[in-house]
């Protein structure tokens, strides 16, 4: 999980608002950094004031109506808000660097990859087999994984 210091670096130590956020614990607090533009961005962190545990970090891209968040895995099962604002749903991220890359791009007004990064920890023999299959298909390993994941998601949608 991203630390309070990492988030403060992302926000350039520019805090525009703070408030109690008792959803996670009685000592939870949120800090926000908004650039002041309605089509701009905001970053938020929710942490425990006593233990410094970070519960969640959020990045909102108002220009493109996108909202990303990274929730501490220890608290991911809580019934957390589904909508960031209006009918804009949160995109939940799993990888710290994915959040950081998106937040930095949003802050600087640059284009960014809207796909979600996932980490896979595969045994070497399975990874080797998949590398060979990707080679046989004349694809990069990343493209091969994307194809596998897309096929799995398409098949799951057919079942629902």
Image: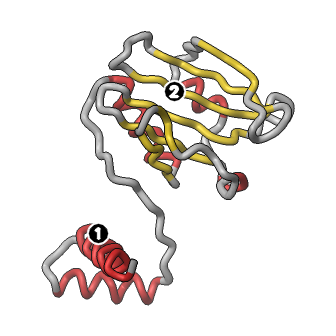
Q: Is residue 48 left or right of residue 38?
A: right
Q: Is residue 40 above or below residue 99?
A: above
Left or right for 19, reference 7: right
Displayed quadrant of residue 31:
top right
The answer to which of marks 1 and 2 sits earlier in the sequence is 2
Q: Residue at 47% of width from left, 32% of height from top?
A: 85
Q: Position of residue 9 (x, y in %)?
A: 55, 25
- Residue at disc 1, secondary structure: helix
Q: Which label number is shown at residue 102?
A: none
Number of labels in the image equals 2
Residue 128 falls in image quadrant: bottom left
Mark 1–mark 2 distance (CA, rounded to whole Å): 29 Å
Position of residue 59 measured from the top left corner of the image (x, y, whole percent): 47, 33
Q: Residue furthest left?
A: 138
In this rendered view, identify the residue nearer to me: 144 or 28.
28
Whether label 1 touches label 2, CB < 8 Å: no
Which secondary structure lies at badge 2? Answer: strand
- Kindly identify the residue that appears in the image at 53 percent across and 35 percent down: 58
Bin the neighbour count of mark 1 within 10 Å (Cα to Cα): few under 14, some 14-19, many 20 and up.
few
Q: Which mark is residue 146?
A: 1
Q: Residue 52: x and y, percent? A: 78, 34
Q: Position of residue 19 (x, y in %)?
A: 71, 20
Q: Residues within 10 Å of mark 2 (few under 14, many from 20)?
A: many
> Dot 2 corresponds to which residue?
43
Residue located at (29% from left, 69% from top): 146
133, above or below 152, in the image: below
Placement of the C terminus among the 4 image quadrants: bottom left
Which residue does the image show at 25% across and 35% down from the upper left?
111
């Amino acid at each position: 999980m991203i630390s309070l210091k990492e988030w403060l670096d992302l926000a350039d130590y520019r805090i525009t608002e703070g408030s109690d956020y008792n959803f996670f614990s009685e000592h939870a607090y949120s800090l926000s950094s908004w650039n002041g533009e309605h089509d701009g961005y905001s970053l938020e962190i929710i942490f425990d004031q006593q233990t410094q545990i970070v519960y969640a970090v959020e990045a909102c891209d108002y220009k493109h109506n996108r909202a990303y968040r990274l929730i501490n895995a220890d608290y991911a099962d809580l019934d957390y808000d589904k909508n960031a604002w209006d009918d804009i749903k949160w995109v939940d991220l799993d990888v710290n660097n994915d959040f950081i890359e998106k937040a930095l791009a949003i802050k600087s007004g640059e284009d960014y990859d809207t796909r979600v990064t996932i980490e896979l920890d595969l045994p070497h023999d399975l990874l080797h087999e998949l590398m060979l299959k990707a080679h046989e298909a004349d694809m990069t390993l990343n493209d091969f994984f994307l194809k596998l994941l897309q096929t799995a998601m398409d098949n799951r949608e057919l079942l629902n």
